[in-house]
């Protein structure tokens, strides 16, 4: 589910069955702790229910001069059981919440990682962070909220039974006021569900703006727009404040209603009990017990708090469900046959935001060939690179590697066959070596690691570090080019049959870019290489060039041949003239790339 624009963005749907299913699964993860919570909570409620009767009996025994009939001991025992159950319930609730929260966070993170880059097209990173952290905490507390909310009706039911056993008129008097209490609580629960759902959504919007501002700190500082950015990020604060006041009004409303009705109900029960005492139908101890049962049965404050917590848990689960509802990429179980890395795109069609980027695109790259992908901004170069390694799937058509459609391959087989290097690589791991190897570096890995680093021209930089490849990654200041070269080394270390470079040399200086390109055409010549290129020099070093334009491949051939076309040369000129001559239109035939 995505955030709707304009006025529709104000409409908040309360969580439904899917969110409740998430909560149930989170509760199940707690296992024995959830069971202990249920048992301890039941014991606590039963002790509360028994206590007025036991205290009343002890009072009657004392009034009659009988102090050795065990009722005072029974009273002490019930209090001890109540205290023990409360302690166990608090312990079990804390553990259940921790287990449930951890499971919800793992489930979200694992699912997000299967979605790949398309997840950021549906959710802002800041909002995702809020869901991963805050919403998981709210939903993780579902076990405690659900158990206590479900048991909150037990004191009311048992109070009615106890009052009936003391005197039926007491129970009937109490029941007269119950419909009003039920209506109060129902209205409160509905109000809180809507308010909490909206509150969490606005919190996510503030988190999204904050993450965006963090990512653009240098630009903000250079432009001197700090005040404007603060205003932009905190723009939802008035709405958040309004929602907070809404919480206060809802709580004040139910508190005021209960403050009016509950004392009247207690006075009515005590008045009837007084008449019963005068008529010898009720003892003094039973009258005392009746007053406690009236207060216990009409305890709106605790029930309202529990309903609020349950509403918060359901709202959090609803936000988590929106993430989990995004369909993950499905993988097959197939494996690749031996082959050189022949890559085929057959009749591929892709539309992005209503714009056709590829319409029936056909391309064949024989194993071992190096293909530069060039084109103006917006022609789909990075999209083609993503399709080649199944970072995304085509809306129509198919992508095959050595004759096998990519969706038929298992995740391990696919990722082992195709490696990537990106313009802005994410450096993962604790050390520089782990960032390149994407794993702990063993002695058997070191020769391959060194060769990859040398090919990416990052070996001299690593040698200057205090501990070489073992240097803590967080303490290493790096330029954009150095980060990019570590990403290249990681791709070069990959042993797959296809290597895709998505503008992965854009931050390198001319000399370094030449050395990396030389490695691509010599040491890595046995692999199929797709290189998104913005520099003419990069395209010139590849076997052939695929020129993207107009929803397909306009021309394909060696760079030296294409360079004679003015429109092709204009692709590499930042301020070049618009490409209007389409006499050499996109080919309708499959493009066969020869080495």
Image: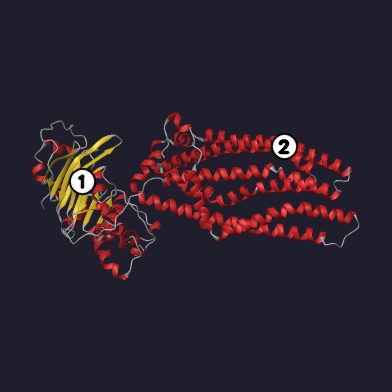
The reply, left or right, for residue 473 in relation to residue 12 is left
Asked whether residue 506 appears in the rendered view, the answer is no
Measured as percent of width and height from the top left, residue 554 is found at 14, 39
Measured as percent of width and height from the top left, residue 557 is found at 10, 45
Between residues 298 and 468, which one lies in front from this camera angle? 298
Which residue appears at 82% of the width and 49% of the height? Answer: 286
Q: Identify the secondary structure beneath mark 1.
A: loop
The reply, left or right, for residue 506 in relation to residue 4 is left
- Label total for image: 2
Earlier sequence position, callout 1 versus callout 2: 2
Of marks 1 and 2, the one in the foreground: 2
Which residue appears at 24% of the width and 58% of the height? Answer: 417
**Which residue of the protein is positioned furthest toward the right in this rendering?**
65
Give the residue at mark 1.
533
Distance, label 1 to label 2, CA atoms, is 77 Å
Asked whether residue 180 appears in the rendered view, the answer is yes
User: The N terminus is located in which quarter?
Assistant: top left
Mark 1 vs 2: CB contact within 8 A: no
Give the residue at mark 2.
177
The reply, left or right, for residue 113 in relation to residue 410 is right
**Which residue of the protein is positioned furthest toward the top in this rendering?**
7
Residue 145 shows which numbered tag?
A: none
**Quarter of image, res 489:** bottom left
């Amino acid at each position: 589910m995505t955030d709707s624009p304009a006025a529709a963005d104000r409409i908040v749907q309360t969580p439904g069955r899917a969110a409740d299913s998430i909560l149930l699964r989170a509760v199940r993860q707690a296992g024995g702790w959830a069971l202990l919570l249920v048992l301890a909570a039941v014991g606590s409620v039963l002790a509360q229910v028994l206590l007025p009767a036991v205290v009343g009996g002890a009072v009657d025994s004392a009034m009659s001069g009988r102090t050795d009939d065990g009722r005072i001991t029974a009273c002490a025992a019930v209090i001890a059981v109540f205290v023990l159950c409360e302690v166990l319930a608090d312990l079990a609730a804390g553990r259940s919440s921790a287990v449930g929260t951890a499971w919800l966070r793992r489930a979200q993170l694992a699912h997000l990682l299967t979605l790949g880059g398309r997840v950021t097209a549906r959710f802002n990173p800041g909002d995702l962070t809020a869901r991963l952290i805050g919403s998981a905490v709210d939903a993780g507390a579902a076990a405690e909220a659900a158990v206590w909310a479900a048991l909150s009706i037990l004191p009311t039911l048992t109070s009615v039974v106890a009052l009936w056993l003391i005197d039926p008129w007491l129970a009937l008097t109490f029941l007269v006021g119950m419909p009003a209490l039920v209506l109060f609580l129902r209205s409160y629960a509905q109000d809180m569900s809507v308010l909490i759902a909206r509150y969490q959504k606005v919190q996510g919007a503030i988190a999204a703006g904050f993450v965006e501002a963090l990512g653009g700190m240098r630009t903000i500082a250079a432009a001197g727009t700090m005040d404007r950015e603060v205003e932009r990020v905190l723009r939802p604060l008035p709405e958040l404040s309004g929602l907070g006041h809404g919480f206060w009004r809802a709580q004040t409303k139910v508190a005021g209603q209960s403050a009016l009705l509950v004392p009247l109900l207690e006075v009515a029960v005590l008045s009837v009990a007084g008449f019963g005492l005068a008529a010898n139908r009720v003892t003094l101890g039973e009258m005392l017990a009746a007053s406690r049962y009236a207060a216990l049965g009409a305890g709106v404050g605790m029930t309202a708090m529990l309903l609020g917590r349950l509403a918060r848990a359901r709202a959090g689960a609803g936000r988590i469900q929106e993430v989990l509802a995004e369909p993950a990429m499905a993988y097959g179980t197939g494996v690749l046959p031996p082959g050189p890395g022949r890559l085929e795109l057959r009749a591929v069609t892709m539309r992005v935001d209503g714009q056709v980027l590829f319409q029936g695109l056909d391309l064949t790259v024989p194993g071992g060939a190096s293909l530069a992908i060039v084109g103006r901004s917006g022609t789909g170069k990075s999209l083609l690179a993503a399709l080649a390694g199944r970072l995304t799937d085509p809306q129509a058509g198919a992508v095959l590697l050595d004759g096998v459609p990519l969706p038929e391959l298992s995740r391990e087989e696919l990722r082992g066959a195709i490696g990537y290097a990106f313009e802005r690589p994410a450096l993962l791991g604790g050390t520089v070596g782990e960032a390149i190897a994407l794993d702990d570096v063993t002695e058997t890995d070191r020769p391959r690691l060194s060769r990859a680093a040398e090919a990416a021209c990052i070996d001299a930089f690593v040698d200057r570090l205090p501990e070489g490849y073992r240097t803590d990654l967080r303490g290493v200041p790096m330029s954009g080019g150095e980060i990019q070269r570590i990403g290249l080394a990681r791709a070069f270390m990959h042993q797959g049959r296809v290597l895709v470079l998505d503008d992965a040399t854009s931050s390198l200086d001319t000399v370094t870019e030449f050395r990396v390109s030389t490695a691509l055409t010599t040491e890595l010549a046995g692999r199929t290489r797709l290189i998104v290129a913005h520099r003419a020099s990069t395209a010139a070093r590849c076997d052939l060039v695929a020129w993207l334009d107009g929803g397909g491949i306009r021309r394909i051939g060696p760079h030296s041949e294409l360079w004679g076309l003015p429109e092709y040369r204009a692709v590499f000129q930042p301020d070049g003239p618009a490409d209007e001559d389409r006499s050499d239109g996109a080919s309708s035939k499959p493009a066969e790339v020869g080495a």
